[in-house]
Image (cartoon, coloured by chain):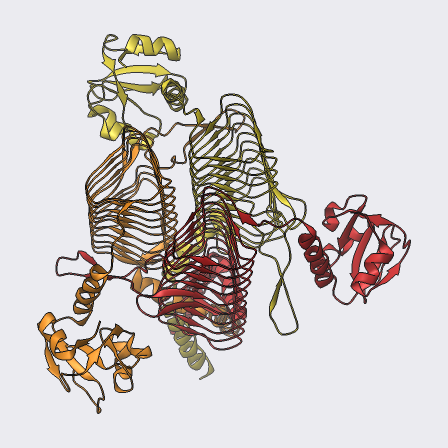
Chain colours: A yellow, B red, C orange
Amino acid sequence: MEISAKNLAELLNGTVEGNDEVTVHDVSKIDQGKPGTLSFLANPQYTKYIYTTEAAIVLVSKDFKAEKDLSCTLIRVENPYHSLATLLDFYQQSKPQKTGIEQPSYVSSSASYGENVYLGAFSYLGQNVKLGDNVKIYPHAYIGDNVEIKDNSIIYSGAKIYEACKVGANCIIHSGAVIGADGFGFAPDDNGDFKKIPQIGNVILKDNVEIGANTAIDRASMGSTIVGEGTKIDNLVQIAHNVELGTSNVIVSQVGIAGSTKIGDHNMFGGQVGISGHLKIGNQVQIGAQSGIMNNIEDGSKIMGSPALEIKSFFRSNAIFRKLPDLYKEIGSLSKRVQTLQESVEE
Amino acid sequence: MEISAKNLAELLNGTVEGNDEVTVHDVSKIDQGKPGTLSFLANPQYTKYIYTTEAAIVLVSKDFKAEKDLSCTLIRVENPYHSLATLLDFYQQSKPQKTGIEQPSYVSSSASYGENVYLGAFSYLGQNVKLGDNVKIYPHAYIGDNVEIKDNSIIYSGAKIYEACKVGANCIIHSGAVIGADGFGFAPDDNGDFKKIPQIGNVILKDNVEIGANTAIDRASMGSTIVGEGTKIDNLVQIAHNVELGTSNVIVSQVGIAGSTKIGDHNMFGGQVGISGHLKIGNQVQIGAQSGIMNNIEDGSKIMGSPALEIKSFFRSNAIFRKLPDLYKEIGSLSKRVQTLQESVEE
Amino acid sequence: MEISAKNLAELLNGTVEGNDEVTVHDVSKIDQGKPGTLSFLANPQYTKYIYTTEAAIVLVSKDFKAEKDLSCTLIRVENPYHSLATLLDFYQQSKPQKTGIEQPSYVSSSASYGENVYLGAFSYLGQNVKLGDNVKIYPHAYIGDNVEIKDNSIIYSGAKIYEACKVGANCIIHSGAVIGADGFGFAPDDNGDFKKIPQIGNVILKDNVEIGANTAIDRASMGSTIVGEGTKIDNLVQIAHNVELGTSNVIVSQVGIAGSTKIGDHNMFGGQVGISGHLKIGNQVQIGAQSGIMNNIEDGSKIMGSPALEIKSFFRSNAIFRKLPDLYKEIGSLSKRVQTLQESVEE
C-alpha cells in the first residue's frame, strides 16, 4: 500500500513541508530509516538522525526547528508519537483478522461464545466458559472452567487462565502468561514443614488491560487479585495473591509484587522492582528499576534503591558510595592529624 | 453450603463466643469481611479490623483479648490459620474432581497410568511414561519420554516435563513450569565462540513439592538436579543444573539459584534473591528479598543485601548510607577545622 | 554401551595412565563419582575429589600433577571439558532421534517443510510457515504465520513463535520461550491513560542461537529485534523490542534488557542483571550478577553494582559499606576531639 505525504497529512490533520507527492509503503525507525518509508521524531535524543535519515517522510511536532538542510519531507503534527500510533492502528486493522474455529479445538458442552470469535487449533474452553463477541483465543490457550472473557479480548497462544477468573473487554494476554495459578500460601507446622492453604479466590482483569508474555498473576487466597482498568503489565512479572492494582499503571518487565499489596492509579514501576507484601502504594508514584520497596509509599513519590529512598537522595548517597575508599583514607589521615595535634597541644 | 458456628466449632475442636446459631456460606479476608462469611485473625497487623468486619464468624486464637465490642461471633482455636487451612481443604475436597480422559489426548503406546487419573484434552504422554493413581494431567501438559509421576500429583495446563525426569507423590506443578530443560553449559573455543555441552542428567522432585507458574528447573549436566521433600517453590524461579535443595524450603518468586549450589533444609529465600553457583547453603537460613549471595552460608544465618551481610549489619550500614551526603560534608568541614587548628598551633 | 580407557584415549587423542582395560558405561561428576563411570577434572576447585572419587576413569589436562595416590585411571587430554563435550555429543547423537509427524498436529495448507522433520502431536504451523531440513517441532509448539526456521533447529514443547519471526539454522528454543510477543509500547494521553502502539516489527534469531526456558524476546515496534550468531540466552530472560545482540554473547538467567539497547559481541552478563533502554554496550564486557546498567559501556569493561561501577572499585566501596557504622562513630568521635582541641587552643 503506497500513500503520499499529502494524503497522510490529511489523515493526520497535519501540514506538509517539502515534496507532498512523495509516497511511502512502510515505516522505519529514524536511525534506521530506509527509502520509501515513513519515520517519526518523538524522542529528542534522536533529533540528530533527521539530517541523515533515508526515510522519505518524517512526522515531527509543530515546534520542530531544523538546524540543517533536510532531504526528507516533513509532516508537522500535534504529537508525532500519537500520529504514528494512529497510522499503525490503521495499518494493523487493515490486515486480515483471525476468525472462525480451527480443528481440533476443545469446547465443553456448557461453554458459550459470541459472534465473530476465533478459536485456534488446540485451544481449550472448559465448563461454563463465556466468551464475548470478537474474542480471539489462539492455539494452545487454556480457558478453565467458569472463566468469563468480555468482547474484543485477545488471548495469545499458550496463555493459561485458571478456573473462575474474569477478563474484561479489549484485554490482550500474551503467550505463556498464567492467570490464576494458586497463591503461594503455606502454614508451617511444629516441625517446620508446610501445609498448603487452598487458594479459593480468583483473578479479575478489568477492561483494556495488557499482560505480557510469561507473566504470572496468582489467584487470591480468598476474594480477588485485581488488575485495574487500562493497567499495562510487561513480560515475566509476578503479581502475588490478593494484590490490587488500580487504573492505568505501567509495570515494566520482571517486577515482583508480593501478596496483599494495594496499589493506586497511574504509577510507573521500572524493570526488576520488588515490592513487599501488605503495603500501600499511592498514585502517580515512580519507582526506579531494581528498587526494593519495604514501606508504604505516598502519592507522587519518585524513589529508587534497595531499600528505596527519594530518588535524588539515592543518587546523592550513591555518588558518595563511589568515593568511600577515598573517604575512608581521609578519615584515617584526619584521625592521625588530630592525634598529632592533641599531642602537641598537651605538651 | 451453610454451616453454623456451633458445627464449625465441633469440626475444629474450638469454642464459640457469641451466637452459636449464626451460619456462614463462604469465607472472606477480615479487612474485606462480608455478611454470611467466615473470616480469621492470624496476623496481628489485622487485629483492628475485627471490630468493624462484617464477617459473621471470625476464627481467633485462644489468647485473643477483645479490646472493644464485637459484632461477630468468635470461634477460639489453637491456631486460626491451621484451622482455616483445614476448612479450606474440606471445602476444596468437597468440589467435584477432574477425572477421566478427554479427547483428543496423546498417549504413547508404551505409556501407562494408574487408577482414577485425569488426562485433559491435548495432554501428551511420551514413551514409557508412568503415572501413578489419581494423577491429574491438565490440558496441554507435556510429559516427555520415560518420565515418572507418582500418586496424587497434579500437573496443570501447559506445564512441560522433559524426558527422564521424576516427580514424587502429592506434587503440584503449575502452568508454564518447565522441568528438565537443558542446563546452561557451554565450552568456549579459542575464538570465544561457544560449544554446547549436552546435558544428559535429569530433574528429581521428591514428594510434596509444589512448583509455581513459569518456574524453570534445569536438568543436570550429569546426575540429577534435586528438589527435596516438601520444598515449595513460587512462580518464575530459576533453578540451574545440578542444584540440590533439601526438605521443606520456601523459595519465593523470581529467585535464581546458579549451577551446582547445594542447599540444606528449612531455608526461606525472599523474592528476587540471587545465589551464585558452586556454593553451600546450610539449614534454617533466611535470606532477605533481592539479596545476592556470593559465599557459603552457615546454619541459622539471617542475611540481606547484595552482596549479603548479616541482616542487622546490613540495616545498620544502610542507615548510614542514607546519611552519606551529610557525612561527606561533615568530613570536609572537619578537615578544614583541623587545618585551621594546625595552622594556629604551628604559629 | 561399555568402552575401555584405551578406546576412549584413541577417540580423544589422549594418553592413558593406569589400567587401560578398565571400562565405563556412564559419566558422573567427580564429586559424585560412581564405579563404572567416566568423570573429568576441569575446575581446579574440584581437584581434591580426584583422590577419593569412585569414578573408574578421569579425564585430566596434560599438565595435571597428582599429589597423592590415585585409584582411578587417568586419560590426559588437551582440554578435559572439550573432550567431555565431544564424548557427550557422541553419546547424544547415538540416541534415537525424534522424527516423523505425530497426530493430531495442525499444518496449514500453505506451510512447507524439508526432509526428516519431527512434528510432535498438537504442534501448530501457521500460514506460509517454512521449515528447513531436520527441524524438530515438539508437541504444543506454536509456529505463527510466515515464520521461517532453518535447518536442524529444535523448538521444544510449548515454545511460541509469533508471526513473521525468523529462526536461523542449528538453533535450540526451549519450552515456554516466547519469541515475538508485542513490545511494551504505549503512548500516554492527556489523562495519563495509555494507548497501545502496534508493534509491527519482528524477531530475528541468527544461526546457532540457544534460548532458555520461559525467556521472552519481544518483536520490534518496527524493524527487528536481533539475536546474533552463536549467542546463548538462559532461562527467564527478558529482551525488549528493538534490542540488538551481536555474536557469541552469554546472557545468564533472569537478565532484563530494555528497549533499543545495542550490544556488541562476546559479552557475558551475570544472572539478574538489568540494562536500561537506548544504551550501547561494547564487546567483551563482563557484568556481574544483579548489576544495574544505566550508561553506555566500553569494550572490555568489567563492572558490577546497581548502578554499576568498575568491578574492583565496586568491591572496594562495598568493603567500606560494611564498615559504615564504625566509620560513623569514628567521625563523631573525631568531631568531639576537634571540638575539645579548638576549645583548649582558644583558651
Rendered image quadrant of residue A328? bottom left
Count the labels in the image. 0
Is residue A226 something one can see in this rendering? no
Rendered image quadrant of residue C77? bottom left
Residue closest to the far front: B109
Residue C298 vertical placement versus A84 (above, below)? below
Q: Quadrant of the C terminus of chain A?
A: bottom left
- The residue at the point 22 percent across, 77 percent down is C24
Residue C101 vertical placement versus B89 (above, below)? above
- In x, y percent, where is residue B154? 53, 55
Task: Please give left or right for residue C9 compared with residue A328 in the image.
Answer: left
Residue C17 vertical placement versus C1 (above, below)? below
Q: Quadrant of the N terminus of chain A?
A: top left
- In x, y percent, where is residue C239? 34, 44
Q: Nearer the viewer, residue C179 or C54?
A: C54
- The residue at the point 48 percent across, 42 percent down is B103
Is residue A25 something one can see in this rendering? yes
Q: Nearer the viewer, residue B308 or C249?
A: C249
- In x, y percent, where is residue B155? 50, 54
- In x, y percent, where is residue C88? 22, 65
